Amino acid sequence: MQRLRLRLDPLRETLLLTLYARALDAGLAHPILGDAHSAGIADAIDYDFAKLDLKPSLVCGTALRAKKLDEAVRRFADRHPDAVVLDLGCGLDTRVLRCDPPPGVDWYDVDFPDVVDLRPRFLPDRSVRIGADLTAPGWLGPLPRDRPAMIVAEGLLPFLPGDTFQRMTRELTAHFRTGELAINGYTRFAAWSMRYHPTIKAIGITAAQGFDDPREPETWDAGLRLVEEQLLARAPEVADFPQPLRAATRLMSHSTTLSRQGTRVLRYRF
Ligand SMILES: C[S@@+](CC[C@H](N)C(=O)[O-])C[C@H]1O[C@@H](n2cnc3c(N)ncnc32)[C@H](O)[C@@H]1O
């Protein structure tokens, strides 16, 4: 099979990291997410994935947060069969295939134009693609306003500079009448230390931001109300983590402060 070489700058290249983490999870004896589509896409890309040197903690953490965010999307689509779903900073994620939304749900995959243009090369056409820089206003205009919106942003927060994530959130909640925002949260420490993570360093990313208090987004003037903070160190799926990661994660799970430094999924209503 002819593998495709992609031209991506470091910011976009981060999509290969999450893609490959899901691909590696799919190959485990006890996968957390079991996303065979991601494994197929990674196989089709000509890239030195080995240089990412992904550790089990990143593989399992990425697979588990994807699973929890998928569950949030499915629950929302079950409750709102006329929903719109927005996957912000979608990269080459296969979430739309994993969630398989019912016909009344419209799904929008949003990322830089050159990134969303890559999607049809690897993925079946199940969503509307929106090519946009999320730090710039204006891209929301054509989207319906009067339908419940499920907005999911995985692995995006640390890469949006300054207060642009907050600004984007205000624009989203002003546009849609009602809905939910689900993200994977990063504490300030987690976001800061990410810069020194060998994988992120290998890619060359320097910007990173996060917040500690899960209620902080309630102060963004975006009408958000925290409905759930899931500390994934306490998730039942940890039983399927390989050792010694399983033991270390269980130890960490006794402390809320330490668990918050790990993977967490935050859900807000508006
Ligand atoms: C770590 S990747 C996560 C990709 C995907 N959510 C996943 O889990 O596989 C971050 C993604 O955010 C996108 N991104 C970062 N900054 C962006 C911006 N200003 N506008 C649009 N997309 C952006 C990148 O192109 C990349 O696809």
Image: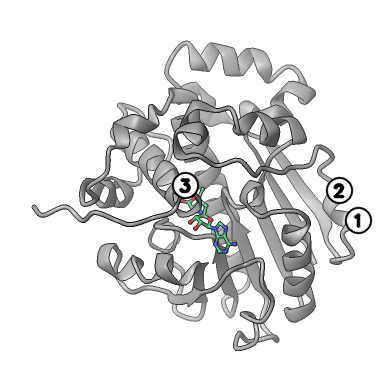
Other residues around mark 1 within 10 Å, as few (<14) / some (14–19) / many (≥20): few
Q: Marks 1/3: CA distance? A: 29 Å
Give whichever of discs 1 and 3 has the lower sequence position. Answer: 3
Q: Nearer the viewer, residue 203 or 253?
A: 203
Where's residue 239, x and y in %? 50, 22
The amino acid type of the residue labelled 3 equals: Thr
Q: Nearer the viewer, residue 79 or 96?
A: 96
Answer with the quarter of the image where residue 150 lies. bottom right
Q: Marks 3/2: CA distance? A: 26 Å
Disc sitting over residue 219 in the figure: 1
Q: Nearer the viewer, mark 1 or mark 3?
A: 3
Q: Is mark 2 within 8 Å of ligand 1?
A: no
Q: Is mark 3 within 8 Å of ligand 1?
A: yes
Where's residue 94, x and y in %? 39, 57
User: Taking 162 as reference, is 253 above or below it?
Assistant: above
Where's residue 31, x and y in %? 37, 33
- Helix, strand or loop at mark 3: helix
Q: Are marks 2 and 1 in contact (CB under 8 Å)?
A: yes
Q: Are marks 1 and 3 in contact (CB under 8 Å)?
A: no
Disc sitting over residue 216 in the figure: 2
Answer with the quarter of the image where residue 172 lies. bottom right
Give whichever of discs 3 and 2 has the lower sequence position. Answer: 3
Residue at x 71%, y 64% (from the top left corner): 180
Disc sitting over residue 87 in the figure: none
